[in-house]
Image (tube, coloured by chain):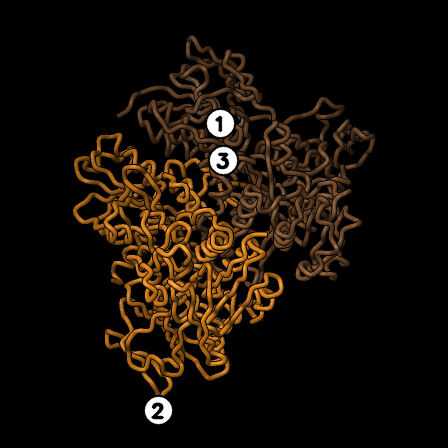
Chain colours: A brown, B orange
Amino acid sequence: MPEKITIVIVGGVAGGASAATRARRMNEAAEIILLEKDEHVSFANCGLPYYIGGEIAERQKLLVATADLLRKRFRIDVRANQEATRIDRAAKQLDVRDHLKNEDYTLAYDKLILSPGAAPLVPPIENANAPGVFTLRNLADADKIREHAVKTSARKAVVVGAGFIGLEMVEQLHRLELKIVLAELQPQVLPPLDPEMTYPLEKALRDREVQLYLGDGIAGILTDERGNASGVKLQSGEVTTGDLVILGLGVRPNSQLAQEAGLEIGATGGIAVNRFSQTADPDIYAVGDAAEYPYGPTGKQQRVPLAGPANRAGRLAGEHAASGASAEMPDVQGTAIVRVFQQAAATTGLSVKMARKLGIDAWSVTIAANHHAGYYPGAKQLVLKLVFAPETGKILGAQCVGVAGVDKRIDVIATAMQFGGTVRQLAGVDLSYAPPFGSAKDPVHMAAFSACNYLDGVDLFLDSDANLSGQQVVDVRTEKEVSAKPLAGADDAIAIPLDDLRERLGELDQDRPTVVSCGVGVRAHVAARILRQNGFADVQNLSGGALVREWAIAQRTAE
Amino acid sequence: MPEKITIVIVGGVAGGASAATRARRMNEAAEIILLEKDEHVSFANCGLPYYIGGEIAERQKLLVATADLLRKRFRIDVRANQEATRIDRAAKQLDVRDHLKNEDYTLAYDKLILSPGAAPLVPPIENANAPGVFTLRNLADADKIREHAVKTSARKAVVVGAGFIGLEMVEQLHRLELKIVLAELQPQVLPPLDPEMTYPLEKALRDREVQLYLGDGIAGILTDERGNASGVKLQSGEVTTGDLVILGLGVRPNSQLAQEAGLEIGATGGIAVNRFSQTADPDIYAVGDAAEYPYGPTGKQQRVPLAGPANRAGRLAGEHAASGASAEMPDVQGTAIVRVFQQAAATTGLSVKMARKLGIDAWSVTIAANHHAGYYPGAKQLVLKLVFAPETGKILGAQCVGVAGVDKRIDVIATAMQFGGTVRQLAGVDLSYAPPFGSAKDPVHMAAFSACNYLDGVDLFLDSDANLSGQQVVDVRTEKEVSAKPLAGADDAIAIPLDDLRERLGELDQDRPTVVSCGVGVRAHVAARILRQNGFADVQNLSGGALVREWAIAQRTAE
């Protein structure tokens, strides 16, 4: 029997619940106390939007592990509605507020695991707390929103913030047949992605008559005569009505408790920890949205408020606290996915935008390909952007958007990143292929091949939003394609179908900087190779072709 | 402009076509001649079964790149119906038989790329060439089978061989409403998988009234009075009628041409090559089903007759031949997938069975989990088996079966294998998660966690087909579950629901070797931890629980 120690865990959802159950499995003798300031432990917070929209019909399903199960099966002393208010590190005890009994008490610990999560950001604006204004973090929030949306006469919702939760809420409120307004301070939805990659999402939103205000933040909540929210005023001065307002503005880590106990807070505002999730005080661990993780693409510590890392870190911290040892917390890549109506958008690691902000030199290629063999019925196009370091070819990140197969491609790339993989190594991954599932050359390979061509100087890529003026732009699509959809932002493009290019080289000036483009970049690659080998000194391939160019120009205009 | 050389490519499908187009992109000056002994180049051979079954309706779609496109766009001298018959290495020339003109000619080369593929195995049995007996390798074969199945009165097909192509043919012939008999020499379908993992496939087949003869090979073809195939005689003596016989018995590499030229043939019968796909003669390359590849799980060279490696190796060989340099061919893991009605089954690397055959020490864990969050509607269970090295934890292989999400999990694991990854590293991969796409703890994580527990001695796993007699078997499912489906092959199992286990420890003998089991292995893990910490010295967790146990016992009985 292992050591009889007392492990206190603050926060009973993803990280905390994982820590508690793993701690029990590693230590039958330990006393394990799980404090949760709200009503429910171990609920599926990622499922809340789907419950609100009714796609998850039974509320019961969101309770992944009930307090009763944790007590019976894991002998965990689950204390809901109890909030840790102070850590006395010297005495190794905790002040706890029992919100049900309105009492305070102290609790001694040998090991303390902090998994207090994060709180939704509420801006300092007028009427931010008016009835009808909601944030979404727990089951009680979801119940209130659902009640308001379903049982009252709400017909129009304003969602503020077009991040993951904002977008999921838009989709689910649309499912409830509310009209939707979506406002986002950034000039694009889903800010972690590069702007052009969000075009299909915006289109999906507009197709469902979601009214978008991009590049516009919230300035205040409007209320009716009874003081209920009746709309939103934006920073631009724009006013929009709405009887339900969802604030999806991101989260603030609940790091106060740790900070007040003198524990170090990291550069990104989360509780600083080592690879065992230990804070500066080795008897105190921190995991989940309040903590920082080793972030793969930069090698630095940062907050990554996502469920996956919280679960994994909680499990490891629970093991370490209970047994004195565990594996180290591996790098986190920040892999995430969201569905917006039929579209899925996923990301891992750095976007080009983020890399620039961090001063990290990044190249990228964007390809479009079918999610499975094109000759097999039902193939859907997906667009994949691969971001990598120019010299080493190390994969820095990826983004993918499409209606099918998006998660698989991002997961494969995220896995390669876990090994510090390069685009050269990615080009060699041996993926499963049969016509209903993939292609002999998967989109992952196509992106990696392009990136290797870029690194080797075989084909140089130009960002899809590049300014093409002054360059010789050669559009190698067929005449029919070109006239149906001219290349955006390239009025003087010279149209020469690829199969005629060799004969018509004389129409081009080989000394001018030249950009080639086609539908999605495949034919342009062949064209670029022909030109380069025929004495054209400066040839670039417009990444993602006319397809992604259209997205990029639309997003540039939007800005 | 690069060097003007002549590159001759033998074989115009996956590897050959990839080589030809990449060679052209790297070298505009080269003369590139593509010889194909059959009628069509660059057709989608993996799509043939789906064309036969009518799921791919247009034959045209199978012609990925037509000879015309290869000529026009890539200036490739495509010569269909022309077969290389002899290589004169000293003179660097090739004898070619033009099957259309019935003429022979010689062709000089600077670089020669062999991509002749493989030929379907036809056993030396009576009437193997009778009308109505088919193998499937090219479009002409597919046309003939389709004609026979659709346009004649064929009502019953006998498929011999239950590998990838055999299973795809069963599915597609069933789609054409033929009755199906499937015979396989191995005692299971899909021999690359471990037997228990094929149970759901066999069930899917039996559910559609496919008549299975397992562990029984073909002895002869029966014919009617007109000499047409009318059935099959099996080695057991069993006779089955059928007016269409498909031989899906695997392939034999077309290595004669190379062998006759004195080039080295590897231990597995493929043409031996280095990492640049060069044979012993540096001006002669070999790729595709006729060649060998570096195989990741063993580090040795072996044949892997799959489309993905053929395409990648062809592309690299084409580059090397055309420009004198290329990246090295990366390890191949043998990743493959097949759909059998609703079930998908995928594999990468070694099964336990294969590892044993090779004398490689392998451990495995098998888990069952939902393909996305269980609380989100539509979650489907998949079963994932992870095979790894006992000391290092290096991933050796994986198998997955289920109706959704199978390809993604195998691709993630295959990617980790590409980096020589261990199960410990796999436990840390940062995968995308939102309820419609995955789980915060993905099936990949659950399998890796189990494997790490095994390596660390936290929980030891017993193979699902183990003989349990003489051991204390504890079934920790609820009474209701146990009575609904008792644990297979464990008549004297002691049923103690997990949540009562701590109170009822006195009913168990802590000195007896003990095996715990539950539904799929999750609760048994908790139970094992309780027992081990309470003085039970020898405790093992039955991998995959009652679910996979049922599969394993059914398959063991079948053998």
Pair 3/2: label in front: 2
Report the residue at 47% width, 56% height from top: B314
Name the chain under label 1. Answer: A
State the SS at label 2.
Answer: loop
Tell me the tag on residue B59: none
- At 23% from the left and 44% from the top, the residue drawn is B473
Residue B176: horizontal and vertical position, in percent? Answer: 48, 74
Image mark for residue A308:
3
For disc 2, the chain is: B
Measured Cα–Cα span from mark 3 to mark 2: 67 Å
Q: Residues within 10 Å of mark 1 (few under 14, many from 20)?
A: many
Residue B387 visible: yes
Q: Residue furthest top?
A: A90
Q: Amino acid at mark 3?
A: Gly
Q: Nearer the viewer, residue A501 or A79?
A: A501
Residue marked by disc 2: B225
Q: Position of residue A101 (x, y in %)?
A: 52, 19
